[in-house]
Image (tube, helix red, strand yellow):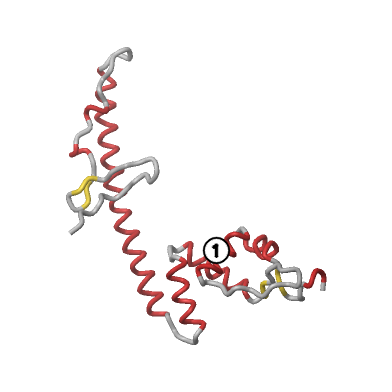
Amino acid sequence: MKNGKRPGTFSAGELARELGVSTDTLRHYESKGVIARPPRQSNGYRSYPAEIVPRLQLIRAALTLGFTLGELAKILNIRDRGGAPCRKVRELAGAKLKSIETRLKELTTLRDAIRTTLREWDERLAITPSSKRCGLLETLRPRAFPTVNGKLFVTTEKNRLARPKRKNK
């Protein structure tokens, strides 16, 4: 038992390496309530039981599907108390799919608008001498941009496709 470590346990560093995450990620998962705070070794280091590996793999897979840590904390809490959150999990996954499908439609609309704009710009460039401005940006009009519920998309550096801001009621 080196450094007070019990057999069948992982230090935070060992577990992080095993899962391909950082030790900060493990601490974050603890703070969000998706994993329990592990006991400490005699030297004060965290000592994770080997049984936590499947749970962490489940968390990583669920995050990949778009579940949030908050959602997972609620779901896993129900499971840990012996409940069956399966219908809630299905409902959340269905909502995520619907959101992705909406987003894909929005992105398709944006792609089509960019294609049209590029085609128009290519026509302008073809008839404009290379030493002259052809006013590409000046040709942009609201009709050239996709809308959702009649509101324009706004592209920013921070998030390439920001949704229109909602008006407060």
Relative to 139, say whether 75 is above or below. Answer: below
Q: Quadrant of residue 68?
A: bottom left
Question: Total marks drawn?
Answer: 1
Q: Which residue appears at 43% of the width and 63% of the height?
A: 66
Q: Quadrant of residue 84?
A: bottom left
Dot 1 falls on a residue whose secondary structure is helix
Picture quarter with the C terminus: bottom left
Q: Position of residue 113 (x, y in %)?
A: 26, 40
Q: Which residue appears at 68% of the width and 69% of the height?
A: 46
Callout 1 environment at 10 Å: few (<14), some (14 to 19), or many (20+)?
some
Q: Is residue 115 left or right of residue 19?
A: left
At label 1, the amino acid type is His
Q: Is residue 51 left or right of residue 73?
A: right
> Could you say which is closer to the camera, residue 145 or residue 82?
82
Picture quarter with the N terminus: bottom right
Q: Position of residue 106 (x, y in %)?
A: 28, 51
| Residue at numbered disc 1 | 28
> Residue extending furthest bottom?
82
Q: Which residue appears at 23% of the width and 54% of the height?
A: 166
Q: Position of residue 75 (x, y in %)?
A: 45, 76
Q: Is residue 55 left or right of residue 2?
A: left
Q: Is residue 9 left or right of residue 1?
A: left
